[in-house]
């Protein structure tokens, strides 16, 4: 019985320390620290997936196209990258609420990349990178 408890406890610890759970915790901390009062942060759903070199290049191509003059910009595609499928981080889409002292509820969401070092980078939402 004693060993069953330790096995269950170690299993729970192993499950909660997955890269996805660590990324979710890092994003939750990042978001709550940027609110007026972190106490009023209410996390919503998280959506995670691997973030690869190819995803990074595609994001940069979208930023470049967004910054280009719309009259001279040609729709481009992201170039293929050697070892583009190698995971370099975890992409996290997160919706959350901020409950204020006045009773207001503000809803927001964001897209983030969490690197293995724990660094959190907020991305421009993908819907803004598309054609206008």
Image: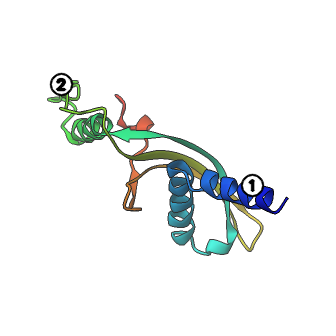
**Disc ID at residue 74:** 2
Where is residue 117? Give x, y as percent: 37, 61
Q: In front here: 115 or 56?
A: 115
Q: In front here: 110 or 88?
A: 88
Camera-side mark, 1 or 2 = 1
Q: Secondary structure at mark 1?
A: helix
Q: Earlier in the sequence, mark 1 or mark 2?
A: 1
In this view, 45 is above or below 3: above
In this view, 117 is above or below 45: below
Contact, mark 1 vs mark 2 (Cβ under 8 Å):
no
Name the residue rendered at 24%, 38% in the picture.
57
Q: Residues within 10 Å of mark 2 (few under 14, many from 20)?
A: few
Q: Residues within 10 Å of mark 1 (few under 14, many from 20)?
A: few
Instruction: Classify the position of the N terminus by image quarter.
Output: bottom right
**Disc ID at residue 18:** none
Q: Residue furthest right?
A: 1
Left or right of 16, for residue 124: left
Name the residue rendered at 21%, 25% in the picture.
76
Name the residue rendered at 67%, 53% in the picture.
11
Judging by the rendered image, the residue that carries numbered circle 1 is 8
Q: Is residue 107 visible?
A: no
Quadrant in the picture for residue 101: bottom right
């Amino acid at each position: 019985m004693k060993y069953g408890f330790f096995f269950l406890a170690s299993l729970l610890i192993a499950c909660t320390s997955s890269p996805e759970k660590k990324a979710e915790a890092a994003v939750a901390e990042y978001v709550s620290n940027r609110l007026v009062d972190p106490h009023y942060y209410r996390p919503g759903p998280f959506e995670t997936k691997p973030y690869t070199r190819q995803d990074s290049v595609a994001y940069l191509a979208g930023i470049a196209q967004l910054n280009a003059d719309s009259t001279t910009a040609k729709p481009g595609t992201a170039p293929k990258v050697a070892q583009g499928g190698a995971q370099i981080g975890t992409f996290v889409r997160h919706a959350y609420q901020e409950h204020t002292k006045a009773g207001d509820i503000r809803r927001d969401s964001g897209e983030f990349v969490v690197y293995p070092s724990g660094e959190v980078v907020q991305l421009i939402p993908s819907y803004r990178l598309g054609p206008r």
